[in-house]
Image (cartoon, rainbow, N blue to C red):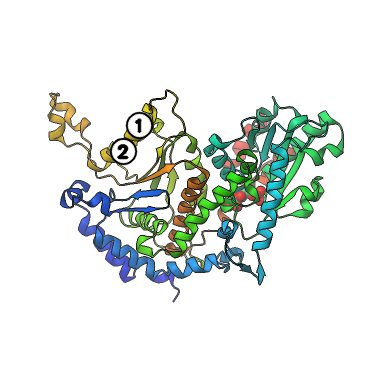
């Protein structure tokens, strides 16, 4: 009998099901009334992150039961296996070692009897030398011009992390080096990006682990054509293109000098790669010193995750709360709500990190699960979301567990009074308060309003949320925050017994698109199902 067959039937799971039944009618208001210290009690500070998880439907018993589940699913053992380079990505037979990328202080880490640490340090030094030369204006384009624009061409894991972090740390950026990101195969993306750029002062980073991804290679070839059209010399490619990849032969074929290739390894998954050479665009933007601070932040959270007992382990707690909401309270989704404009791409980044990792329906042994796995992740920065979709979170019929993320200190104070930031944070606190405690009909009636409006103005409350309050947005604290979510996702994958590090679900669409591309390009009739056939015919008719 496989380990997974017993998950739902296990004592731990059954007891949690019972706990959910037993506590389902207790309102968050009652939990807070029963314990005046609940807010302090259900909170944890790690590094620069203060996590308040008190506004969740849980009590001491729930937490104990969840921790028993984590023990039963051997979370500690699996965590050790990841950090020591065991091939825990079983369907691809790969180690999962993004933590080694930021483990800059300690001893060797082995994959197939080879210590990976020296290679990591070498690439980091290579990246730093290159970033310095571009930022200092020593790296010159083909006509002798310094570089003013960097265009990162990549998609998925080779795009979302770099975009998110470059935006998040824009405060620390070299302002006269403009960063651009092209990912979509839609020609509009590259067309609109390049239309105002001058190739003599533009450098392209072709970021692709495989160097075969259709979107990236199509955009890279277009960029190559754009450069050659204006500079009219093949030797210009060496000055205007660098690559980040694991595939040296394809990089060479493209015409990029292997000296300008920044390597990484198959044990770095795409969506976990921003601390590898895939972060080159980040380093160019914020500089090598800040990039190392970012790695330092990741390392702090890695160390905490690796060493803290499960009961005081922030990624583990976040993961267990997510499991509780998903598997026992029936939540289908999680909203990520950063009250920080610089983090405006953080929800999109976490969407991939979480949904590509845990959007699985078979166990590691290939058996269909009989429980819910990864939630739908979505979100937008506050306060914008408040004027858009928060209505549904407050008064709709769905359960939307929220993560509020805010910073104690702001990086900007445009009117010199601090009012913007105080208003921002007051809104964040207000939202989780309103979600948890709501407003009863009696409270609504305190003001003189027509009776027929009362129910419209009632807030049931009782809606769960976590709040993460960080000191200040820096490379270091951002690293801590990202690593926190990476490890949360890992812990949930372990509990669900799924492979969080493969992504077979993206394959079918790619194969079908290739076939359809060939057919519509050659004018061949598309046959098969009547929907796709009709769509293709209509498209052909409209050409
Ligand atoms: C991430 C996925 C995926 C990948 C892209 C780009 O974990 O593997 O998003 O990053 O498909 O792949 P390449 O880097 O190989 O172009």
Q: Element under label 2?
A: helix
Gap in angstroms between the C-alphas marked 2 and 1: 11 Å
> Dot 1, how many residues are within 10 Å of its Cα: few (below 14), some (14-19), or many (20+)?
some
The residue that appears at 19% across and 32% down in the rendered structure is 455
Q: Quadrant of the N terminus?
A: bottom left
* Point 59% across, 46% down: residue: 291
Q: Which of the two residues, 535 or 175, is positioned nearer the viewer here? A: 175
**Res 58 quadrant in image:** bottom left
Q: Is residue 26 left or right of residue 6?
A: left
Q: Is residue 234 left or right of residue 504?
A: right
When asked about the image quadrant of residue 2, the answer is bottom left
Q: Position of residue 374 (x, y in %)?
A: 44, 54
User: Where does label 2 land, which residue?
Assistant: 429
Viewer-proximal residue among 491 and 359: 491
Q: Which residue is mark 1?
A: 422
Q: Name the residue located 62 percent from the left edge and 32 percent from the top edge.
A: 538
Regarding residue 212, the answer to whether it shows in the image is no
**Image position of 258 with respect to 100: above or below:** above
Which is more toward the observer, 484 or 529? Answer: 484
Measured as percent of width and height from the top left, residue 273 is found at 59, 52
């Amino acid at each position: 009998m496989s380990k997974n067959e017993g998950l739902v039937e296990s004592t731990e799971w059954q007891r949690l099901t019972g706990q959910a039944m037993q506590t389902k009618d207790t309102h968050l208001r009652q939990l807070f009334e029963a314990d005046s210290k609940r807010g302090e009690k259900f909170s944890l500070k790690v590094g620069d992150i203060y996590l308040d998880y008190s506004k969740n439907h849980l009590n001491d018993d729930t937490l104990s039961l969840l921790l028993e589940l984590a023990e039963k699913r051997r979370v500690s053992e699996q965590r050790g296996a990841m950090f020591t380079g065991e091939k825990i990505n079983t369907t691809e037979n790969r180690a999962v070692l993004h933590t080694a990328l930021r483990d800059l202080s300690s001893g060797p880490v082995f994959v197939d009897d080879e210590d990976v640490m020296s290679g990591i340090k070498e690439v980091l030094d290579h990246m730093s030398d290159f970033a310095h030369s571009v930022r200092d204006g020593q790296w010159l384009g083909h006509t002798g011009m310094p570089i003013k624009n960097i265009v990162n061409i990549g998609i998925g894991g080779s795009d979302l992390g770099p975009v998110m972090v470059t935006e998040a740390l824009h405060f620390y950026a070299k302002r006269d080096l403009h960063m651009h990101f092209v990912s979509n195969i839609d020609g509009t993306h590259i067309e609109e990006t390049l239309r105002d750029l001058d190739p003599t002062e533009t450098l392209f980073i072709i970021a692709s682990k495989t160097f075969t991804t259709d979107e990236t290679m199509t955009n890279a070839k277009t960029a190559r054509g754009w450069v050659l059209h204006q500079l009219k010399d093949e030797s210009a490619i060496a000055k205007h293109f660098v690559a980040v990849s694991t595939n040296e032969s394809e990089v060479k074929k493209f015409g990029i000098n292997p000296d300008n290739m920044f390597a990484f390894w198959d044990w770095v998954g795409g969506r976990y790669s921003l601390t590898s050479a895939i972060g080159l665009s980040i380093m160019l933007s914020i500089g090598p010193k800040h990039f190392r601070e970012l790695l330092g932040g990741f390392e702090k959270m890695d160390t905490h995750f690796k060493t803290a007992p499960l009961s005081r382990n922030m990624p583990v707690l976040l993961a267990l709360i997510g499991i509780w909401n998903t598997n026992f309270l029936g939540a289908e989704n999680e909203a990520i709500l950063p009250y920080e404009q610089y983090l405006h791409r953080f929800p999109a980044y976490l969407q991939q990190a979480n949904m590509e990792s845990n959007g699985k329906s078979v166990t590691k042994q290939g058996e269909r699960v009989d429980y819910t796995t990864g939630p739908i992740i979505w979100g937008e920065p506050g306060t914008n979301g408040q004027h858009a979709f928060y209505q549904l979170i407050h008064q709709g019929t769905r359960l939307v567990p929220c993560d509020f993320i805010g910073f104690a200190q702001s990086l900007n104070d445009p009117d010199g009074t601090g009012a913007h930031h105080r208003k921002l944070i007051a809104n964040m606190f207000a939202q989780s308060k309103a979600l948890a405690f709501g407003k009863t009909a009696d409270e609504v009636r305190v003001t003189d309003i027509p009776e027929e409006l009362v129910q419209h103005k009632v807030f049931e409350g009782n809606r769960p949320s976590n709040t993460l309050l960080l000191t200040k947005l820096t490379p270091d604290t951002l690293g801590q925050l990202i690593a926190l979510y990476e490890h949360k996702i890992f812990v949930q994958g372990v509990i669900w017994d799924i492979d969080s590090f493969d992504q077979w679900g993206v394959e079918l669409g790619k194969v079908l698109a290739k076939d359809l591309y060939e057919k519509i390009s050659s004018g061949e009739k598309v046959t098969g199902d009547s929907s796709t056939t009709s769509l293709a015919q209509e498209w052909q008719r409209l050409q």
